[in-house]
Structures are given as structure tokens and as C-alpha cells.
Image (cartoon, helix red, strand yellow):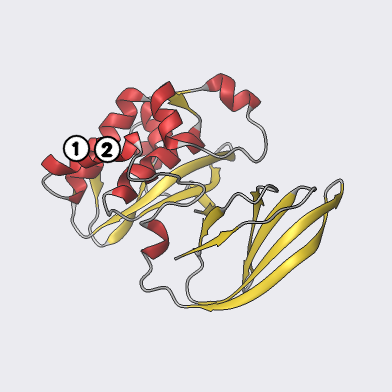
Amino acid sequence: GYVAVSAVSESRLKFQVVKDDITYNYDISSQGLPSIFPLQSGDGTYLFRIMENVTESKYTELYSASSEVQIKDEFQPFIRPNSYVNYSRASNCVKIASEMASTAADAPDLVAEIYRFIVANIKYDSEKAATVKSGYMPDPDETLASGKGICFDFASLAAAMLRSQGIPAKLICGYVAPNDLYHAWNMFYTPQTGWITVDYEVTGDSWNRIDLTFAAGGANADFIGDGTNYTDLYTY
């Protein structure tokens, strides 16, 4: 459910993942450090390209390879860490999620515990939102330690805690109406139906949308509604 890449160059590098008419462009290290990304477009032929910066915003192909991919099941890319949802067994966020899982009655109960924990302990960082630069990557444990973050941080932390306990979770970036706000949120899947908050019920056997950033800011489940005001662009 994922692809790993590492490369060395004196120039800036990007990693391109292409399947059919879907293209993802990722910034990667030029120092040989590995990066891991999900194969979120399902089964089929993928084209992988490492692109090297030549002038300003122009890139040239440094390396390419194609591969036939068969995903064991649709959840595989979303139950493991990657460069956008970066965690390990030693991560503090995983330890906290594990403690919650040990007493949770079922998956919706665990989602509810993680939901309440993030809303209670992480605040929105307006200064960071105003100064964050292109290529920024979230760090769930750093968000946990600082107690603040932008929407990307909220979504990455939630995905890390959920995935680490076997609950499939997507980190999604896109736009939210009516102001076309570029934003990040989560979708998660459980086989059970249950309540996360008094006014937010999880539907079993389907992907459910959850927006921790707005929840932490005081918005209730009515803001998310049926999800029609959300436009998904990128899934990690």
C-alpha cells in the first residue's frame, strides 16, 4: 500500500506518482533520506518519476519506473505510517492511543476518545498558519508536545493515532465552502455504528468524515453536515 523513495542531488527534487489521470507531486530530500508515500489510487499501473529542479520552477526527469500494483484491500494504504502521517511504535501519540484502546469498548468508542483528547489538548496556531511555508510536513509527536498546530497537524495527529490502533484513516487536503478555505481533515472507517459526540454519529461499514480543527475551535457536527461543502483534492 505504499512506495518508498530516496535520491541524492545537488538540486531540489520532487517525486511524482502517476496513475491514469491522477498525479501526485511530492517534495523529497536531496540528501538520500527515505520518503514514504501511499498508493492511494488503487490497483493498476503506476508511473514513478524523480524530477530534478533545473531552473526556477522547471524540472527534468532524473529517473522513472513503472509498476503493476495490486492492493491487498482498500484499507492497506491507510493503516500504516507514511511521510504525511509519520509515527512508529515508540511515538508518544501511539502510546497514548494504545492506552485508550486498552479500555475502549469498540472502534467508535476509541475514535470518540481520540476525538475528545485532541479537541481538549491541541489548539489552533494562527501564527503558524500565517507563516507556514510550502513543503511543510507535519509531525504528530511535535504537535502533541507543543499543544498547538494548523489543520494539517490536527489531521496528521488524528490519522497517526487511529492508524496505529488498526482503524483505517485518511488525511485529506482540499477546499471547504462557502469560503473555499484550503484545509485538511480526516476520513475514517469502522465496521460498527456508534456515537462520537452527542450530535455526531458514526455510520458503520462506510468512511466517516471528521474535522478536528473545526471541532477544537468550537464548531459542531452540523458544520460538517453531509460533507457536500468539502471538496477532496489530495488523499494521504
Q: Secondary structure at mark 1?
A: helix
- Residue 223, quarter of picture: top left
Q: Residues within 10 Å of mark 2 (few under 14, many from 20)?
A: some
Which residue in the protein does label 2 denote?
95
Q: Where residue 53 sits: x, y (%)?
A: 81, 52
Is 128 left, or right, of 221 in this rendering? Answer: right
- Name the residue nearer the viewer: 89 or 118: 89
Is 78 left, or right, of 53 in this rendering? Answer: left
Outermost residue to the top:
127
Which residue in the protein does label 1 denote?
99
Q: Secondary structure at mark 2?
A: helix
Query: What amino acid type is highlighted by mark number 1?
Result: Glu
Q: So how many labels did they put on this image? A: 2
Which quarter of the image is occupied by the N terminus?
Answer: bottom left
Q: Residue at x 24, y 49 (%)?
A: 202
- Name the residue nearer the viewer: 61 or 168: 61
Residue 189 circle label: none
Q: Where residue 159 sits: x, y (%)?
A: 38, 45
Q: Are marks 2 and 1 in contact (CB under 8 Å)?
A: yes
- Name the residue nearer the viewer: 7 or 173: 7
Q: Where residue 151 sits: x, y (%)?
A: 49, 34
Is 89 left, or right, of 192 in this rendering? Answer: right
Q: In the rendered image, is residue 90 in sight?
A: yes
Q: Residue at x 48, y 28 (%)?
A: 149
Q: Residue at x 57, y 53 (%)?
A: 34
In space, the residues marked 2 and 1 are separated at their CA atoms by 6 Å
Q: Residues within 10 Å of mark 1 (few under 14, many from 20)?
A: few
Query: What amino acid type is highlighted by mark number 2?
Result: Lys
